[in-house]
Amino acid sequence: MRRVPEPLVDEREDEHGVQNGGADLRLAALKDRFLAGTRIDAPALHKTKVNKVRVERFNEIGAVNTKIRTLIGGEDGALTTSMHEILVGKGGSTAMHRHDWEHQLFVQSGHGRLEAVDGKITLAPGDVVLVGAGEDHRFVQTGKEPLRFLVVTPL
Ligand SMILES: [Zn+2]
């Protein structure tokens, strides 16, 4: 099925309101400023190095031996999406979970498995995966090296 790009501001503002909180408010503010012809003060460019970003414990309930880096977030000027690096150590996994947004992920290194209701798929370096909104899923590390992947998610 062909996906049609969404306009800068769409109906999700009304639909998700408070749940998506900041992102929708920022998007609405950005639209207002754009329409008013005023300067948009969010930085247009941001660059860092992955190794300069602090690694934090992944606080999801049920996650085992999993860490996260926020590579790009709201503090860096992002308005609608953020990019995280997820690091699942040996024997680690995330909890089975679901959310109303989709995951777009890119496997950098290590091996693992994505478990969903419809089955399991293996994860290896270079794999690019979409997990659709509302899908139950979890990530499980396999092999000797930590599983490292990037995810793009709504702010
Ligand atoms: Zn998820």
Image: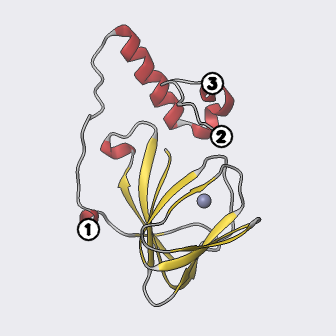
Mark 1 falls on what kind of element?
helix
Colour setting: secondary structure
Which numbered disc, 2 or 3, marks the residue closer to the eye? 2
Percent position of residue 102, x then y: 60, 49
Q: Is residue 37 left or right of residue 150?
A: left
Residue at disc 2, CB closer than 8 Å to ligand 1: no
- Is residue 64 in sight in this rendering? no
The three-letter code of the residue at mark 2 reads Met
Q: Answer with left or right where residue 155 lies relative to residue 115.
A: left
Q: CA distance from mark 2 to mark 3?
A: 21 Å
Q: Quadrant of the N terminus?
A: top right
Q: Which residue is mark 1?
A: 51
Q: Quadrant of residue 61?
A: bottom right
User: Percent from the top left, x then y, of residue 148?
Assistant: 43, 72
Distance of mark 1 from mark 2, alpha carbons?
Answer: 38 Å
Dot 2: few (<14), some (14–19), or many (≥20) neighbours within 10 Å?
few
Q: Which residue is identified by label 3?
A: 11
Relative horizontal placement of residue 20, taking residue 8 as reference (left or right):
right
Pinpoint residue 100: horizontal percent, then vertical percent: 67, 47
Residue under label 2, please give it: 1
- Residue 47 can be seen, yes or no: yes
